[in-house]
Image (cartoon, rainbow, N blue to C red):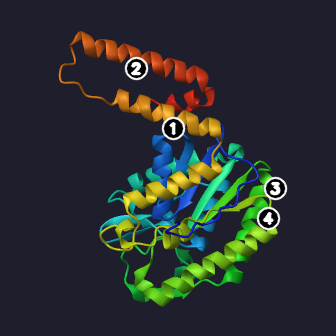
Amino acid sequence: MNFFTNIAISHPPRRFSYADAYLLMGSCFAQNIGETMEANQFDIDVNPFGILYNPASIASALRQIVVGKPYGEADLFLWNGLWHSWMHHGGFSSASKGTCLANINARLVRASARMDRLTCLVVTWGTAYAYRLRQTGQVVSNCHKVPEREFVRERLSVASIVEDWTLLLDNLFSRNPQLSLILTVSPIRHWKDGAHGNQLSKATLLLAIDQLQERYPERIIYFPAYELMMDELRDYRFYAGDMLHPSEQAVSYIWETFCENYLASETLEAMQEWQKIQKALSHRPLNPESEAYKQFQHQTMLKKQRFMEKFPYFGAQTDKGEL
C-alpha cells in the first residue's frame, strides 16, 4: 500500500559528477543545497551576489558575472550608517565603503573566472514579486530596509521573465556550449503575499520555466523541489518553526532525491565513501596521545589516500586547505 503520491522526475540528458563545475544562484533553498554540495567537496560557487529571490535580479546578477566589470563607488549608496549595493544581499553591506566594494568585487572576480569552464548552472527562483526603485526603475535585489515609498512593487509577468531569460540564455549557451541549466522553484512559501498571492507567484515562475524548457529542451532541466515539498512532504512536520521554510529533514530529502536522479553512480559512491572519511577526520578522541588514536589516524589517512587515487576528480576539489 502506498501512503503518498510520488513525484515523477525526468532524467537529465546526462548525469552530473565531480568532474563538473557548478554555480548555484537564487533563494535560501539554493543556499542550503549549495552548502551541502560544498560540504561534499563539489567544484562549486554559491550565490556570489548573496541570496536573491526574483528572476529579474538573478538574471541581472548573471549578466554582471559574464561581463565581470568591477563595481565602483558610484554603485553603492549609504543608508543607516552602512554602504549597500542594490544588486547584492545585505551580507555584503559594511560601514566601510572600501570593505563593501572589496567583498563585492572579490566574489565577482571568483564567479567570473569560472564562467568559461562552467558546466552546470543551478538556479532557484523564489518569487515572481519584485521591487523597482522609483527614482531609476531598476529592479533591486534587496531593499536594505529603505522605506517602502521609494519602491514600486510588482509581480513580474510570465512574458517578461521569458523574454529576459531568453536573451540571457542565448548569450550563455552560445558562449559556453557545454553548459546545462537546472531550474527549480523554491519550496519556501512567501507568506507576505498571502496564500493566494504566493500561489500566483509560484504559478508565474512555473509557467515561465515551462516556456523556457520548450525553447531549450536539450539544455534546461526542471527539478521539482516545489512539488516534492507540496506533495511528497505534505505535512507540517517537514517545516521549520515558522511553518514556511522546509525543515532540515525536508531539505535533506530533497537533496537525496536530487542526487538519486541527477548524479552519476560513481559520484554517489564517492560521496558515501567521503562522508565516512570526513566523519573519521572530525573525530575528537578523549586521549589524543594514545597509541590507539595514533593508529586510528594512520588508518584514516591511508583510507583518504586510497580514496583520492580512486576518485581523482574529487581529489582536485579537496585540495583547498579545508581538510
Quadrant holding the C terminus = top left
Q: Nearer the viewer, mark 3 or mark 1?
A: 1
The answer to which quarter of the image holds residue 57 is bottom right
Q: Disc 3 and disc 4: Cα gap in Å?
A: 12 Å
- The residue that mark 3 highlights is 174
- The residue that mark 1 highlights is 41
124 vs 89, left or right, is right
Element carrying mark 2: helix
Q: Nearer the viewer, mark 2 or mark 1?
A: 2
Residue 101 percent across, percent down from the top left: 46, 55
Q: Are marks 4 and 2 in contact (CB under 8 Å)?
A: no
Q: Closer to the N terminus: mark 2 or mark 1?
A: 1
- The residue that mark 2 highlights is 300
Q: Nearer the viewer, residue 176 or 222?
A: 222
Amino acid type at circle 2 is: Thr
Q: Disc 1 and disc 4: Cα gap in Å?
A: 30 Å
